[in-house]
Each structure stands twice: as C-alpha cells, then as structure tokens.
Amino acid sequence: MMDTILKTTNIVKKYGNKIVLKNVSMNIRKGDIYGFIGKNGAGKTTFMRTVLSLTPIDGGEVVYYEDKKIEDIGLKVGSLIESPGLYKNATATENLKRFSILYGADEAKIPEILKIVGLSDTGNKKVKDFSLGMKQRLGIAFALLGDPELLLLDEPINGLDPEGIKEIRDVILKLNKEKNITFLISSHLLDELSKIVTRYGIINDGELIEEIDAKELHEKCKNKLVIECDNPKKAKTIIEKSVPEEDIKVKEKRVEITEKVKESGKLNKELVSAGITVNALYVSEDSLEDYFMKRIGE
Amino acid sequence: MNKLIKLQMRNLFHNKLLYVCLGLALLLYPILDFIMTKTMSSLLNIAPMKVFPEIVSFITSEPGIISVMFIAIFACLDFNEGTTKNIIARGYTRNELLISKYIVTLLGLLIIQVSVFLVFLILFASNGFGYEPDMLNKIIVGLFSIVANTLFYSTLSFVLEKNSSAILACLFVPRIFSAILSLIETKTKLSISDYWIEGILSSFLEKPTVGNMILPIILFIVYSLLFAFIGTKIMNKREIK
C-alpha cells in the first residue's frame, strides 16, 4: 500500500456567495505524479492555494503525511503557484540564496539547481531582465530548494518554448524516479501532461469529478474498434447482428464499435464473408483531451 | 522565526533602499544643516549656533518623510514582489512573517535615525553644544515613540500591500487623522489628540522628567501592541498573492 502524502477532505472555498470548491477530497500518494486537470476557472489554482494555506478555507481539512499541517512540514513542500514570486532587483543566485536561508537549504546546491532548470549562465543578470520562461524556471528552482518531498506546480510549463517544456518534463521524471519526489501538477497542456502523469484528478466547476490512475485511464481510452471498408452501411448491419448490444456508428468510410476490441478477428471474418472489402481494422484510443471533454460533459 | 528574520535582514542589507534612504536622510538633515549653519554664521559674522536641541528633536519627533518612505517600501517588499507566497507556502505562519517584518523594519529605521543622530553629533561637535540634563529621558521616550510609529506605518503599509499606495497613505493618513482629531476637539472641547502618538510625545517633551517617562512609555507600548494586533488580524484573513 502506498503512503498518502497529501489528503484533503471536503474542502470548501467560497468567494462571497460563489462556491469555488465544493467538498473536494483528494488523495495524493507518495511517488505519484498527479495531473490535476480542469477548465479555466474550474478551481485548480484555488485548490492548490488552499492546500498551501495561501487561501483560507471555509470548510474541510488538509493533512500531509496522515496527520500533519503545512506549518509542521512546510519545508518538505515546494511549490510554484501562478507566477513565481521573485526579488526582481536581485540575480537568480541571490534570489536562491535568500530563500535558502528560509528553507534551510544548502547554499552549495544552488549551482546544481540552476543547472537543473537551465539557468546556470545568467550571471549578474537581474531577474527583472529575465524572460517569462526564465522566471518560470527560476520559480521551479525555488520549489526545488531544500530537497522537498512534494512539489505542487501550477501550470509549470506556461511560457516555456518546446525545448524548455521537454527539459522541465525530463526534470520532473528524473526527480520522481531518482529522488522519489511526489508531484501535483496542473496544466492545460493535456497531451504534455499525459506523457508523465501516473494519476489524474479531474475538476469541473469546483468539484473533483474523478480520480483515476493513468493505466486505468489508458484502458478506458482504448475503447473503439475502427473498421475502414468500402460499404460501411452494410458493414454496420452485419455488425449489429453480431454484437447487438454495442454502440455502432458510421462515419464516412468507417464503422466505429465501442468496447469490442477483443472481437476484431471474428468481425473481420464476418465482413469479408459478406463480400465487404476491409481496408483497415484497428483499435482507436481516445486522447486525454477526448476523455476529459467527455467527463466534463462537453 | 529566526530564519525569517535572517531572510528579512538579507532583504534589508542586500537592497539599495536602506542605503538610498540613509544617504538622503544624512544629506537632508545633518549635512544640509551643517552647511547652512556654517554659511549663515560666516555671512552674518556670528558664532555658529548650538544645534543640540535640534539633534534631540530629530530622534524624538515623528518620522520624517524619508523614514516614512523607507517603512512603506520595506514593509511592502514581499507583497510587492509576490514573494510572500514563497514564505507562507513553506509553512511559516502569517504572524511569524508579520513579526519578522516589524522587527527588521524597526531595525532599518533605527539604523537611519541613529546614523543621522550620530552624524549630527560629529558635525556639530565643534559648535560647543552642552549636555542637557533631560537628554537621555527624551531619547529613551523618543525610541519608544519610534517603535510605535514603525508599527503604525508598517501596519498601514501591510494593509495596502503596494508601494505607491502605502507611501501615499503613510504620508497623508496621519495628516488627515490629525485634522480629524482637531475637528473633533473643536467640536467637543476634548483634547483627544494628546492621546495620539504625537500628542503624547509633545506633552512629555514639555516636562521631560524621569517621573513623566512612565506614562508615555506605557502608552507607546500599548499602541505598538494594538497596531501589531490589528496587523495580525488583517493578515490572517488575507489571501496571499
């Protein structure tokens, strides 16, 4: 059984009369790379802010390591929420030195952290002269200070170029594998997220509608048998007789059958026997985006 | 808490703000005074004036414009830069943050005030000023008033968070407040301004004896605690951006 590193129970947050988090209960297990997905305004950032105590909550509970509060274990939690908070008139190194004091981090590790986030060569350049991407990387460097065990990253690849995105992805995977750091990552870039995430949480209108393991999601997405043929309407009639209980759709030159992946050989044989030319037969997976859109009902 | 104070100390000493304010304060007060005194005495062919009362009044008066600006900008530094969240998200409480801010802001202000005081002393040492019997009493009570003033201006700045609005508020709110007190006094015939920081200090300076020190010191401590309490109440309900 995996240890729970962060658990929230029925978190409620209101702004005036508007409820932005509705009884959100989330479980993040040690070693997870937890992808937190939802539309703009769904409550992702507010949720991350509440677990870090940046936003007071109106109900519910946040505990780390079964029974601890952020005040007890804050130094083990690194975060990058929205835009990074930086001393703009100081250099990257000076910024990290200041927060090393606070996080009890070893200053000698600063060059290594700067190297990890690709900011080794910034020298005396002040943060106010950094590009958006560089500031984002420095924000990640802050989060890495003090050898945290849990990293909360809110849209960490915002403003990064494709190379930067790949670098950050590699850093996350490396830290997760080598140092067993747990991640909670929110992102709009679902395809990017799907390359690293081990578990998902889907939030919609302030409600956590699903928590699902990446493997399970992968299985759920593998849900269509697609048959491309010369006569899809006739094919549909034959298939309906063979698997009457299934959802069968005709789209242009192909027929799509939900959840009959294992019967592809049998169906192929029947179609060929009926004189239909089968040009292609394959299993089609929904993308994370497709699945996400289905779950939030759009 | 110690780590927070260390961070704020580094913010204080690795930032131009302290040095700019110190330089301006030295230039505007003792150095300009010294030049003016020398020029006037040579022009009018009179002996250089004794400026000792002025030195004492500097440390016992309400903070000047530079000191107020220093408090406003330094108190707002982490809010302005967005670094407050880096502190709170690592488990430090809002109260710890606020107390460390108060302590280090006070330290910065004392560095400015005491430096100016010392430069006054050095520059005017040759003018032959004499020791005033109540000088120490004035300085002790003056230091307590500095603490109360620092907490007042810092709290005001915390409430507003942004440099520009904090500076404006620190410069104008006390003036508006004094005007309101005067208006109330005129209407009610009550001398309530005697119980505000400035009034307490003025009353004491009229008779700065040892016996008269206790009440102003107690009142300044009460004011300091009240401002700190208000600051923590506001901070604890606040979203950290």
Image (cartoon, coloured by chain):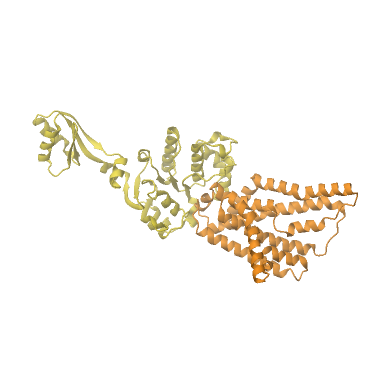
Image position of B241 with respect to A135: above or below = below
Residue B22 position in % (x across, y down): 71, 48
Look at 12% across and 43% down and name the residue there: A244
Task: Specify the quadrant that holds the C terminus of chain A.
Answer: top left
What tint does the image give chain B? orange
Q: In the depicted view, which residue is nearer to us: B198 or A30? A: B198
Image position of B52 with respect to B191: above or below = above
Q: Count the labels in the image.
A: 0
Can residue B100 be seen by looking at this rendering?
A: no
Residue A224 position in % (x across, y down): 22, 39
Q: Is residue A215 left or right of residue A164?
A: left
Point out the residue furthest to the left here: A274
Residue A8 position in % (x across, y down): 39, 56
Point out the residue furthest to the front here: B187
Can residue A280 be seen by looking at this rendering?
A: yes
Look at 35% across and 44% down and name the residue there: A198
Question: Where is residue A14, by image quadrant?
Answer: bottom left
Which chain is drawn using yellow? Answer: A
Look at 20% across and 41% down and name the residue there: A258
Question: Where is residue A65, by image quadrant?
Answer: bottom left
Residue A291 position in % (x across, y down): 29, 43
